Image (tube, helix red, strand yellow):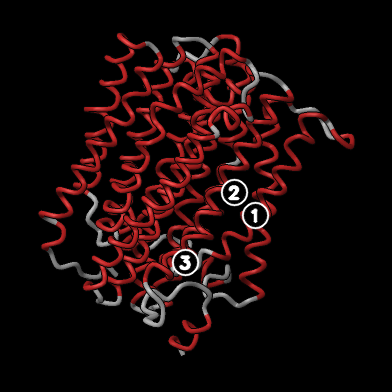
Amino acid sequence: MAQANAARRPGVNIFDTSRPLWVLFLIFLVPLILSNLLQTASQTLGSVFLGRMIGTNALAAVSAVFPVVFLLFSFLIGIASGSTVLIGQAFGARDEHRVKKVAGTVLGATFAFGIFVAIVGFFISPVMLGWLGTPHNIIRQSDAYARIVFLISPIIFPYLAYTTFLRGTGDSTTPFYFLALSTVLSIVLTPAFIAGWIGLPRLGVVSVAVSSILSQGIAFAALLVRLRLTNHPLKFDRETARDMIVDPKILWTVLRIGIPTGIQVIMVSLAEIAVISFVNRFGSSATAAYGAVNQVVSYVQFPAISIGITASIFGAQCIGARREDMLKHVVRNAVSLNYAIGGFLIALCYIFAWQIIGWFIVDPHTLDIAHALLMITLWSYLLFGNSSVMSGVMRSSGAVLWPTINGIFAIWAVEVPCAFLLMKHYGLDGVWMGYPISFVVVVLLQYAYYTFFWKKRTHERLV
């Protein structure tokens, strides 16, 4: 019965020998990349609406909050990483009960964490923005935006967790459909709240956050209904509700894998806080340019991240099915796709850089700053994608310590010091030079550990 259910379950079967592995990669990867692009598009268009309908200060206010939000969301990313490994291994072993048990435990933990973030974030937002040295003329707008983002965490966190569960079972298509729904709703609602269309209140900068909670809340409800109607193994039912009472053993395994990943993400976000504190010294125009460049870079970065996630999921399924012989093929296909897809996107961004930056910024001085920063950093995200693949596959076996140490070292021993020192000599351009330097270091470190240590070990199932 379990095998019959598995056969009907939507998703990619990595053990399908009728098609090359790179084709299976693309079948899973395309909806995943599109999902990440949709999420980014929603944020991007929100920035476009703010910059063009309100002004540069509105864009700067939201950009100033980005590192803080990223910091408090980091633990969720770690939990998601750990749950993906366990769900992927359980799926590879065809153990549907364990898949559901892991999902329930993580769902309960993310909901509780969302409540914690909502409370803590609401009260410490002004203090954190002050620590960042947020320009005085935008700090009130930044605080208003940040507080709403924190308050919606108890809804957003479980929704993101559910999309992670589905992808762990090889299904990247279902999350894509509902991310598309939330993106369309956000694109419609954001300008409606900014301009006060059809009698809606004019919410200013917080329009982006309010439209986000409405669009993602509706999409989450629709996703749960869809899973229920199709009798999906991960539908929310009484068993799932009971499983939300956290299983300590499962949670500990998830945290053992996820906490190092979460720590690395926190270190990345702290580095971004350090970077934006450097950027803020050059004024609100530089802050706005920072936000615009982050938007553009995310279109290159998220496909690379998606390929790393795919490699991790496929690696976990191979380990769960005791097909360790397939891991080298997973790595080879993932790295090749990273350079092919990433190289194409980076080339497009270089060719049309002025036009793309112009979507966010109309002020000529700010536009010049953003263009210069983009030219410095864009190419290096190919190396970022390569290191993401190797660390993702290593994490699929539960090996997280050294990939995390390598990543943190590249950030705090290379990126931040280089940005600070080069800033003294090259101004704002020097801040951005720290990124490619750190990406070179991290890809070398991950490759060395993967080649000389991880490949020589035998990897067993964690569940």
Counting from the top left corner in percent of width and height, residue 257 is at: 29, 54
Evaluate if marks 2 and 1 touch, with contact meaning CB atoms under 8 Å apart: yes
C-alpha gap between disc 1 and disc 3: 29 Å
Counting from the top left corner in percent of width and height, residue 266 is at: 36, 36
Closer-to-camera residue (371/103): 371
Residue shown at 21% from the left, 41% from the top: 405
Q: Name the residue under label 2.
A: 38
Relative height, residue 344 to residue 132 (above, below): below
Badge 2 element: helix
Please report whichever mark, 2 or 1, sits nearer to the chain's N-terminal start.
2
**Residue that sits furthest to the front in the current view:** 351
**Residue 83: image tag:** none
Q: Mark 3 points at which residue?
A: 243
Q: Mark 1 points at which residue?
A: 180
Relative height, residue 454 to residue 116 (above, below): below
In which quadrant of the rendered view does residue 422 lie? top left
In which quadrant of the rendered view does residue 149 lie? top right
C-alpha gap between disc 2 and disc 3: 31 Å
Crowdedness of circle 1 by 10 Å Cα count: few (<14), some, many (20+)?
some
Relative height, residue 444 to residue 246 (above, below): above
In which quadrant of the rendered view does residue 433 lie? top left
Crowdedness of circle 3 by 10 Å Cα count: few (<14), some, many (20+)?
some
Residue shown at 65% from the left, 37% from the top: 45
Please report whichever mark, 1 or 3, sits nearer to the chain's N-terminal start.
1
> Please, what is the three-letter code of the amino acid marked with disc 1?
Ala
Evaluate if marks 2 and 3 touch, with contact meaning CB atoms under 8 Å apart: no
C-alpha gap between disc 2 and disc 1: 7 Å
> Please, what is the three-letter code of the amino acid marked with disc 2?
Leu
**Quarter occupied by the C terminus:** bottom left
